[in-house]
Amino acid sequence: MTDILTVTMNPALDVSTSTDKVMDTHKLRCTAPIFHPGGGGINVARVLHRLGGDCLALYLAGGMNGQRLRQLLDQEQVRGHCIAIAGETRESFSAHETSSGRDFRFVLPGPALTPGEWQAGLDYISALGASPPYLVASGGLPPDVPEDFYARLARLAKARGSRVVLDTSGPALAAALAEGVYLVKPSLRELRELTGHPLQTGPDQHAAALQIIRSGQAQVVALSLGEDGALLVTANRALRARSLPVPVASSIGAGDSFVGGLVWALSRHETLEQAFRYGMAAGAAALLAPGTALCQAADVERLHREVLITPA
């Protein structure tokens, strides 16, 4: 069917703009809005498509925002399967402050889903004739979806032979890790919340990632460290990558681009080190574009040669 299936339970119509300075009580004069289809798995699918990956985006959408989201995905020629819902797909609004380079992100909760709506996502995967080698579960969960939804998804996907890549947060992350996945991509903040420790040093971060692996919660941990780069850990190896010095138009979507580049390379049977290199390049390339425009293939190919990876 496809090499990679991405799952987005709470997609968004991403609206981005910029203004000189964000201040309270004042009317903020902004540039013309830019619209993109958004949500973790959708963004990963957009990156995979640009890199030439064989991908299908599974997502739930409804209302006028859902219709606009589907149209934007069609314009990018991203192959998808939309499960229609009664509620209105959320908007996600971001403002880039040009005077400081900071991004301000306003994230709405999304529509409440009925049990039949969220169960339809699991049923779709159960009914697939052939399981994808990789399944990417990315983004938060909308209201009224069980916290163990990704755990159920991981259990189903693993039983069908797929490698599960997880990028979420909070209780949904903890529940899915208890079920076990192939690869998890937490931020440092998310790893601190999971462990309850400050993880201020490189050895502490490595040890926390290794504990996830030794406890059977994941085979690979890709820890994003923002400006400090990233750490990739397996049971017998740890690699650290420095962030690339690129001009930043927006920091939004860098994590999703990282996952897209990483999974794309893994689906091509690249080594973990090479996949890590492509992930770092895709994340850096996303910084070059405003809003959630994400990375472009030419930038990823150019930048991956510049990624410095060392043993951690």
Image: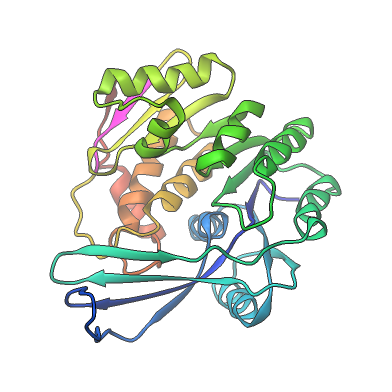
Percent x, y for residue 193? 42, 34
130 to 72, vertically: above or below? above
What colour scheme governs how the chains and residues are painted in the rendered image of this protein?
Answer: rainbow
Percent x, y for residue 235? 48, 15
Instruction: Name the residue at 74% across, 33% down.
Output: 155
Query: How many dots with numbers?
Result: 0
Q: Is residue 303 visible to the viewer in this orientation of the structure? A: yes
Magenta-drawn stretch, dominant element (helix, strand or loop) = strand
Magenta segment: 238-243
33 to 194, vertically: above or below? below
Dividing the image into 4 quarters, which one contains the C terminus?
Answer: top left
288 to 194, vertically: above or below? below
Q: Nearer the viewer, residue 216 or 290?
A: 216
Q: Among all residues in the image, which is located at the extreme front?
A: 25
Q: Which of 269 and 156 is in front in this view?
A: 156
Q: Is residue 268 visible to the viewer in this orientation of the structure? A: no
Q: Nearer the viewer, residue 124 or 297?
A: 124
Instruction: Name the residue at 60% across, 60% down.
Output: 10
Instruction: Name the residue at 59% across, 70% down.
Output: 77
In reply to whether residue 181 is colored magenta, the answer given is no
Instruction: Name the residue at 45% across, 12% down.
Output: 236
Q: Quadrant of residue 106?
A: bottom left
Percent x, y for residue 28? 24, 83
Q: Quadrant of residue 218?
A: top right
